[in-house]
Image (cartoon, rainbow, N blue to C red):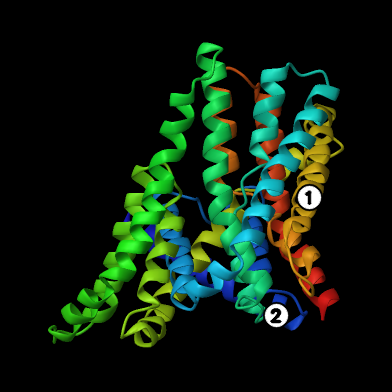
């Protein structure tokens, strides 16, 4: 992609995102739904105006990291401590219920146990970015439900690592060892504990450094660098980079300049975040959704079943939230979106020869469909709670 194509893609992406985002808001929906619809329209399956190149994908990845960093900055770490029991309960149910339902569905369609296990595993992980954006648009992110969803998504990520390590070990060697599980979960748990504890302990050094700098943009550059460092560190131990960026936000929420950082990071996030959501929509291939093509029927049938059990499994996770007055439907709806982790698990199963192209295609379509359905479901749940 040369500069001309890159600039043209950005122009189309930004104009369509803002146009459809504005329409969505005026229709009483979240702006993120407009971004997703814009992506479907300008993607390869409709107009084909924008190709999701590696450069755009990387910009989108930075965008979702900035989104979670911004959320962390505006969060109170003590709030997460207060809801940790509920977050654990929601995460555990939100992993086990979808896995069990997906496994049952897959075995009912005649798939082998290991194939069924991979199918179930793709339903476990929550893609919290969509829920975070919708809740922020609705002004419900800094609620008990919003904090439980965020906390559960972090725990969810670690639990998925555990289950995935077991399934991959079975696929490779037919056996599972305690060492496999320790290798998957140990670094992740250690990273989160050390990053947040050490960060809060030494956050005063960040303030001291910024106070000694006088060049333009020092505050936002140093803050972004810190978020990127923790994001890369999370990637190195097997966690999603957005978890590291979120941890960085939680740490800097205790810094002297946290309000100024939050104000100055918003315009930067506004440049990158829409790219992520538009590309999610652009990944939808409508050619696989036509019921008039007999070759699509098996994939559509499996996709439909996966969508149903994926939604039910995550809605059940809301039952793990403790306390009176907590809206469990909102929590469950906030855990519904699936994203890159589901696709990674599916790609792993395909590369190991465990699942076939048909199952892989159904999983991709399921993730795409939930990306469009989840904002509507979450908005309905929030409106019902009010």
Q: Nearer the viewer, residue 249 or 53?
A: 249
Q: Quadrant of residue 318?
A: bottom right
Q: Is residue 154 above or below residue 199?
A: above
Sequence-wise, the earlier of marks 1 and 2 is: 2
* Apparent side of residue 100 relative to residue 222 in the rendered image (left or right): right
For mark 2, what is the residue? 25
Count of numbered labels shown in the rendering: 2
3D distance between C-alphas at marks 1 and 2: 24 Å
Q: Between 303 and 178, which is closer to the camera in this rendering?
A: 178
For disc 1, the neighbor class at 10 Å (few under 14, some 14 to 19, many from 20) is many
The picture places residue 254, in percent across and down from the top left corner, at: 37, 78
Q: Which residue is mark 1?
A: 311
Q: Position of residue 135 (x, y in %)?
A: 65, 73
Q: Contact, CB < 8 Å: mark 1 with mark 2?
A: no
Q: Residue 180: where, in percent of width, then height?
A: 46, 26
Residue at left 52%, top 38%?
Answer: 161
Secondary structure type for disc 1: helix
């Amino acid at each position: 992609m040369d500069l001309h194509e890159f600039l043209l893609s950005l122009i189309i992406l930004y104009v369509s995102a803002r146009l459809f985002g504005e329409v969505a808001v005026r229709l009483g929906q979240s702006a993120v739904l407009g971004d997703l619809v814009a992506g479907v329209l300008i993607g390869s399956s409709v107009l084909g105006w924008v190709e999701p190149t590696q450069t755009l994908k990387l910009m989108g990845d930075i965008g979702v990291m900035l989104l979670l960093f911004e959320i962390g900055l505006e969060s109170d770490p003590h709030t997460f401590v207060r809801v940790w029991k509920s977050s654990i309960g929601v995460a555990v149910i939100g992993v086990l219920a979808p896995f069990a339902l997906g496994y049952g569905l897959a075995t009912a369609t005649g798939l082998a146990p290991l194939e069924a296990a991979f199918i179930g595993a793709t339903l476990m992980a929550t893609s919290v970015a969509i829920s975070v954006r919708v809740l922020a648009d609705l002004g419900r992110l800094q609620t008990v439900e919003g904090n439980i969803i965020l906390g559960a998504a972090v725990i969810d990520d670690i639990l998925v690592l555990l289950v995935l390590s077991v399934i991959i070990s079975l696929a490779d060697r037919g056996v599972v060892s305690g060492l496999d599980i320790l290798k998957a979960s140990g670094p992740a748990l250690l990273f989160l504990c050390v990053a947040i504890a050490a960060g809060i302990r030494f956050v005063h050094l960040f303030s001291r450094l910024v106070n000694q700098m006088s060049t333009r943009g020092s505050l936002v550059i140093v803050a972004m660098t810190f978020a990127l460092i923790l994001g890369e560190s999370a990637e190195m131990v097997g966690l999603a980079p957005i978890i590291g960026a979120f941890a960085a936000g939680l740490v800097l929420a205790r810094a002297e300049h946290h309000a100024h950082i939050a104000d100055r990071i918003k315009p930067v996030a506004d440049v990158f975040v829409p790219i992520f959501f538009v590309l999610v929509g652009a990944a939808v291939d409508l050619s696989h959704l036509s019921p008039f093509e007999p070759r699509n029927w098996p994939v559509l049938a499996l996709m439909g079943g996966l969508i149903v059990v994926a939604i039910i499994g995550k809605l059940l996770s809301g039952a793990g939230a403790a306390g009176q007055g907590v809206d469990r439907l909102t929590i469950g709806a906030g855990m519904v979106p699936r994203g890159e982790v589901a696709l990674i698990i599916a790609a792993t199963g395909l590369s190991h020869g465990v699942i076939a192209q048909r199952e892989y295609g159904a999983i991709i379509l399921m993730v795409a469909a939930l990306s469009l359905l989840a904002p509507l479901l979450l908005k309905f749940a929030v409106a019902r709670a009010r």
